[in-house]
Each structure stands twice: as C-alpha cells, then as structure tokens.
C-alpha cells in the first residue's frame, strides 16, 4: 500500500482533466489509493478482490478488450518489467492504441533498479520470506533496458514522450520496506486513517538520490475524444471489444455482456470481476508459472536467539550499585556491543530525525552557549557547525569537532548553576535508570539559564517500536544494539509521569513540540540498520543536505515517535558560558568532588578548594569525575 501510494502520487498530477482512466496491472486497489473517481482496472489476474471505485476487468494479457482511443488516460505502473522482453514492445503499442490523450508508464530499470531487487532479495532471504511475484518476474525476465524502451516509444506513430521526475531511490526503498517488512502495518495503519495528507507531503518531499524507476509521460500529438466518459452512463460498454472477434459488446440479461459479432458472452464472477478472454487465452498468472515455476512455500523462520536480558540486567544492576559503576557499565557496553564492521555513515538518518525537529527552537543565543547532555560522539554536530559542549558518561568514539567532549560520572553535572543558555538532550532520558530520572531533570534545569530541549521515545509508540525491533533484528541475524538492551533495562518513560515531573519544576514552563512521526522514524531507523540499505542512504546523506532536511522534516506526521519538550525558565538569564569567549567554559565548571571552582585550561584543570586535578584523556575528552569514583 505505501509503495503503491508513492507510485500513484507521482502519476496523479497527470490525470487532472481526464474524463476516464484505465489502470493496467493495478492490483486490488490501483489508482483508488490516490483518487476517488471511478476508473477501469485491467489485469491478467486479480490476486485479491478489487476495491471500489475500481471497475475490474481481466484479459488474456495480449490484445486489450477495448476499442481504439477508449480511455482519456492510460496508466501502467511497474507492469512493463513484469512482462517477458519479447512482449514489451507490443504492450506499449496496446497502451497507446487504447489511449485518446496520454499514457503514463513506470518501470524499475538500470543499475538502481537492479540494486533495489538485490537489496530486497537479500532482506527477504534473511527474513525467511519468499520473494514476491514482482521480484520473481524480474528474475525470470530481466529488467527493461532503457534504450530499448525509448526506441520503442519513439517508434509509436503520432506520439511524443518525455521523462518525468520520479520518487528518489531512498524514499522509494523506505515505502517498499513499509509494505514488505512484517508488522509495518502497525505504523502505516494509523497514518492512513489519521494523517494521510502528512504521508503524501512526505512522499512529495522524496526526490532524494537516484530513482530506481524510469517514469514516462506519452502524449498523443493530435488528441481525440475518448469513447469512455465516466460522467456519461453506459459509455464504458460502447468502448469494449470482444476478445475473440473485436466486435462491439452489448449488455444482455443478468448483467452479462454479449458480442454483437460472434455471440460470445462475458459476465462477472463471484469477486465482481468480468473476464474478457478469448477461448484460447489463458490467465497470464499460469503462463508466468510455466516460466518461473510454482511460488515457493514460505521458509520456516529461524528461531529467535534466546535472550539473556534477565542475567544481563542483574549483572548491570550489581555493577551500577558500586561507586563509579555507571562508567564501568558504559565501558562494558561498548566492549559487549562494538560498532559493526561497516564504517558508520557520515550522519545517520535517525539522528537527523531526532535533531531536525528541535532545530527551529534553537536561537543564535543557544548556539553561543550550548550543552548537549548524552551527545554521543557526533551529537547535534550532525545538523549544526557551531561549537558546543557534549556531556557523556563514556564516549564510544572520540568526539567529532565542533563538539568539545566532557565525561562525568552520571550524577551531578560538573557545571555551576545556569552555566549554559540552552541544554539539549535527545534520546538520553530513557537510558537513565528510572529512580534517577527526577534528579536528571532537576540537573538539566539547574544548569540551564534559559532553555531546555529534551526528547526521548515514550509511551505506547516508543514501547511498540522497541518491540518491533526486538522481533526483527534476530530474524535478520543482526545483533541487538546496546540502546535496545538499555531501553528494556530501564523502561520506556511514561508520558503522564514525565509531564507531572515537568509540572513540578519550580520557575519553569514547558510545552510539547511536534516531532518526527513514528511511521517515518521507524523507516529511518530501519534504513540506517538493515543490511544493503547503505546503498540507498549513502547517496541521500552525502547529496543535497537541504533536500534531505526537507524530507526528514516532512516526516512529522501521524503519531509521534518520541516526546519532545521545550522548557523555558521564567527568569531567563544569559548563560555563564559564551563559547566565543576563551576561558568562559572553564570558569563555569564545578569540581565533581567538592563543587569548588576549577583553575586552568583544557589541558590541565585543578580544583581551587580540594586540589583535585583533571585533564583530557587520549581522545581529547575532559574527564570530570570525582577522583574517588574514577577507576585507579
Ligand atoms: Zn465476438
Ligand atoms: Zn574540589
């Protein structure tokens, strides 16, 4: 459904004044996914009951059962690639013959089309799912050759053609993912029911990366009136042609059609589909089965790996209980869940989905005095190039400039009150053990002088997303990532509980912000992780950053994937830190052992009160943990 929506949305602008539309190879819904007006759907075999407003007809797969110029516009989306190469030229001629004005044709082609098939073959094999029919047809017939098709289009007398911009490769793959992965209906369903316009706007923003499909608009040089006009009752019957003898058909008793030439009769079957086949024509489904063999039975899914979560939780809780335990847990986690062998992409899509919605609430003053709590090694640096301070318990990778990395013990933050104008903290709160969450919030508002932006997966959307990942990753043979273990360990936050805590912060106001929807977020997470998807995410991430930002920002539709809150201090003040002023960060630091002032610079700091000394580690991270807690 999502994939079809993407294809039909590209076609929709070309149907504006069409009085009648024929959709060839529509599947059960066809054009109905984007248009409410009646249309004729023609297929060799419907694999499900056709859905209104489609008027469904089946044919034998060769000559279409219509008079010439029967329909104003004819569509054939991803049909040419399902046909044997020898049948493709004649198919294009048939489309042009039955169209009075224009023909819209799409098909996957070229290297991107092949890469799409390869990605899908590998993913479905890993899931133990049989390949869908379209993939098996591609294997049997090969994808269309663009030069050959364009030569066939050029040879259509009285027609001219043009290439139409198509959905980009990455958005196309993401919509395919929504159709082909198990359990994605959980996210697509609420969107289709509640925010269809949002999904359409997202697709419209999807011209990212090389498209996997060729799209053509063919126009008749001298358009003629179409025989079928759905505003004129009975006009469809005048456009039908007997599949046996090409004579006209007329309505006869019992809703059947009778040929005026040979007398053959045709009527609807139990599904409401009228089969217009000559006696010697067999359904192309069985024709295809002869080429590609019977559809394979679903393979038994590999059993899910046994989880060791309970043992892991018990071990982690024990280590946490000792002083400095947070750091040890962080280090252990890095050892247990090392980054995958593949080099990380320059920016991950799910990072952008986190930060871009918060970006409009960050002012120039924010960027002069910005602390990101739980930044990881890239943090907000994926969307901004102004310097900022990143605070972590353990950095899994060396911090990437313009971040200045500071490590702490996980309790009180090593800063004076109101040290930073703005504090940003995305997808960190849910990693804080539940009993420590109120204290974590109090620390954020203690250290922030003006603004706190905090976001995290929460509520039923957050829990269901984790559950889907828990199910999917082992089926794909992927290691469960460390963040997923932590979510399970600490529990996805409850929205009402968090908002009660925000209400209880004295001197602060808060409101929830719009953010990436869970349907888009789920697909962005999967695009980052699934094997083979780097082929699609890489060009989008390295290409036009503005186009990528538009696409990700347009992902804010349907139920949100995370809660994002803007907290503002009632007596707002400038932060102590001005990152443009050397020394102002050091002046805002507080000794983690005694809260005293620190003296020195990034290379060496000493507490004026207790004399404790602090400095950068071998990755350039300033380590500000209380000496008693640091491992000796
Ligand atoms: Zn006939
Ligand atoms: Zn001290």
Image (cartoon, rainbow, N blue to C red):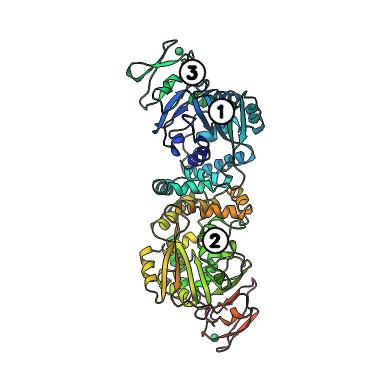
Q: Which of marks 1 and 3 is nearer the N terminus?
A: 1
How far apart, in angstroms, are the residues tagged by discs 3 and 2? 59 Å
What residue is shown with label 2?
Answer: 337
Assess disc 3: are there few (<14), some (14-19) or many (≥20) residues with their C-alpha within 10 Å of its C-alpha: some
The range drawn in magenta is 409-417
- Image quarter in which the C terminus is found: bottom right
Question: Residue 84 at x, y = what percent?
Answer: 58, 27
Secondary structure at badge 3 equals: loop
Question: Residue 156 at x, y = what percent?
Answer: 62, 24
Question: What label does residue 281 carry, if any?
Answer: 3
Residue lying farthest to the bottom in this orientation = 609
Q: Which of 244 and 465 is in front in this view?
A: 244
Q: Which of marks 3 and 2 is nearer the N terminus?
A: 3
Q: In this view, does 238 lie above or below 614?
A: above
Front label number (3 vs 2):
3
Q: Nearer the viewer, residue 261 or 126?
A: 261
Toward which corner of the image does residue 562 lie, by quadrant? bottom left
Number of disc labels: 3
Circles 1 and 3, Cβ within 8 Å, touching? The answer is: no
What residue is shown with label 1?
Answer: 83
Q: Which of marks 2 and 1 is nearer the N terminus?
A: 1
Q: Is residue 26 magenta?
A: no
Secondary structure at badge 2 equals: loop
Assess disc 1: are there few (<14), some (14-19) or many (≥20) residues with their C-alpha within 10 Å of its C-alpha: many
Front label number (2 vs 1):
1
């Amino acid at each position: 459904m999502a994939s079809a929506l993407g294809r039909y949305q590209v076609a929709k602008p070309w149907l504006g004044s069409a009085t009648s539309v024929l959709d060839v190879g529509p599947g059960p819904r066809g054009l109905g996914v984007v248009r409410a007006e009646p249309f004729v759907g023609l297929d060799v075999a419907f694999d499900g009951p056709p859905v209104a407003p489609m008027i469904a007809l089946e044919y034998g797969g060769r000559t279409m059962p219509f008079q010439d110029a029967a329909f104003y516009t004819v569509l054939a989306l991803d049909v040419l690639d399902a046909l044997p190469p020898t049948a493709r030229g004649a198919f294009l001629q048939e489309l042009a013959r039955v169209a009075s004005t224009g023909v819209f044709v799409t098909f996957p082609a070229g290297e991107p089309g092949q890469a799409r098939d390869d990605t899908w073959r590998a993913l479905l094999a890993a899931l133990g799912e049989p390949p869908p029919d379209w993939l098996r047809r591609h294997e049997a017939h090969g994808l269309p050759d663009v030069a050959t098709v364009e030569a066939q289009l050029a040879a259509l007398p009285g027609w001219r053609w043009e290439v139409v911009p198509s959905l980009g490769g990455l958005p196309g793959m993401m919509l395919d993912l929504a159709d082909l992965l198990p359990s994605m209906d959980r996210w697509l369903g609420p969107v289709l029911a509640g925010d269809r316009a949002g999904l359409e706007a997202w697709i419209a923003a999807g011209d990212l990366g090389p498209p996997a499909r060729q799209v053509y608009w063919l126009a008749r040089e001298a358009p003629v009136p179409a025989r079928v006009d759905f505003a004129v009752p009975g006009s469809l019957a005048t456009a039908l042609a007997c599949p046996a003898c090409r004579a006209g058909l007329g309505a006869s008793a019992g809703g059947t059609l009778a040929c005026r030439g040979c007398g053959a009769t045709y009527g609807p079957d139990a599904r409401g589909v009228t089969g217009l086949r000559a006696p010697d024509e067999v359904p192309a489904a069985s024709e295809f089965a002869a080429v590609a063999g019977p559809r394979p039975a679903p393979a038994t899914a590999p059993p899910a790996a046994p989880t060791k979560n309970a043992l892991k939780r018990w071990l982690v809780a024990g280590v946490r209980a000792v002083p400095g335990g947070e750091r040890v847990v962080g280090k252990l986690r890095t050892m247990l869940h090392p980054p995958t062998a593949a080099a990380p992409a320059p920016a991950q899509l799910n990072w952008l989905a986190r930060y871009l919605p918060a970006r409009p609430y960050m002012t120039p003053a924010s960027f002069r005095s910005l602390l990101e709590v739980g930044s990881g090694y890239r943090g907000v640096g994926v969307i901004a190039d102004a310097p900022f301070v990143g605070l972590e318990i353990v950095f899994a990778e060396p911090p990437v400039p313009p971040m200045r990395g500071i490590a702490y013990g996980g309790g009180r933050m090593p800063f004076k009150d109101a040290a930073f104008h703005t504090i940003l903290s995305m997808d960190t709160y849910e990693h804080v053990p539940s009993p420590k969450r109120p204290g974590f919030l109090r620390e954020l508002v203690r250290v922030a002088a003006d603004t706190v932006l905090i976001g995290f997966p929460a509520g039923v959307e957050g829990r269901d997303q984790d559950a889907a990942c828990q199910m999917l990753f082992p089926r794909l043979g992927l290691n469960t990532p460390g963040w997923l273990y932590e979510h399970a360990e600490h529990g996805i936050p409850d929205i009402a509980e968090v908002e009660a805590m925000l209400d209880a912060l004295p001197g602060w106001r808060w409101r929830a912000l719009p953010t990436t929807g869970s349907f888009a977020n789920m697909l962005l997470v999967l695009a980052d992780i699934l094997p083979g998807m780097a082929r699609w995410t890489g060009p989008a991430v390295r290409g036009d950053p503005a186009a990528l930002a538009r696409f990700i920002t347009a992902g804010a539709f349907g139920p949100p994937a995370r809660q994002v809150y803007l907290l503002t201090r009632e007596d707002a003040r400038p932060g102590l830190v001005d990152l443009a002023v050397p020394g102002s960060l050091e002046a805002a630091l507080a000794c983690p052992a005694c809260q005293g002032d620190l003296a020195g610079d990034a290379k060496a700091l000493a507490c004026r009160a207790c004399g404790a000394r602090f400095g950068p580690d071998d990755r350039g991270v300033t380590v500000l943990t209380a000496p008693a807690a640091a491992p000796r």
